[in-house]
Amino acid sequence: MLVQPLTSEEAGNLEKNYDRLMQMAAELDRALYNVNVEMQEAYKGFLKVKTDLDMLKSEKSTLIERSRLISRMLSKF
């Protein structure tokens, strides 16, 4: 099997394609990082709401504590 060397044009096209792929990979990496940060923030919010709901269900919390908690939760909406 005979392998012919690349022409300078073909080599240039390969280099451009490689550079573009590396640029796209970097963009994807940044986007995934941003999604990860947003998911972490959403999870923190979820845990806060879950903690509040667990406290509402707790028999140890007083009526005043529950009403304050409900007011605080509703004020966010």
Image (cartoon, rainbow, N blue to C red):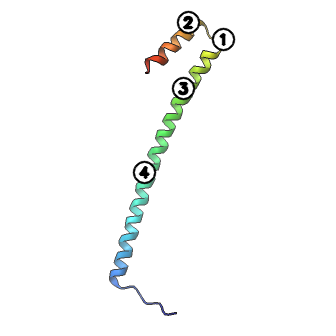
- Type of amino acid at the residue the image marks with label 1: Lys
Where is the C terminus found, in terms of image quarters?
A: top left
Q: CA distance from mark 4 to mark 2?
A: 46 Å
- Type of amino acid at the residue the image marks with label 3: Lys
Element type at mark 2:
helix
Q: Of label 4 and label 1, which has the lower sequence position?
A: 4
Q: CA distance from mark 2 to mark 1?
A: 12 Å
Q: Of label 3 and label 1, which has the lower sequence position?
A: 3
Which residue position holds label 1? 60
CB within 8 Å, label 3 to label 2: no
Please report the residue visible at 44 percent of the width from the left and 59 percent of the height from the top.
Answer: 25
Which residue position holds label 2? 64
Please report the residue visible at 49 percent of the width from the left and 18 percent of the height from the top.
Answer: 73
Q: Of label 3 and label 2, which has the lower sequence position?
A: 3
Element type at mark 1:
loop
- Type of amino acid at the residue the image marks with label 2: Ile
Q: CA distance from mark 4 to mark 3?
A: 27 Å
- Tell me if residue 7 comes above or below residue 41 in the rendering: below
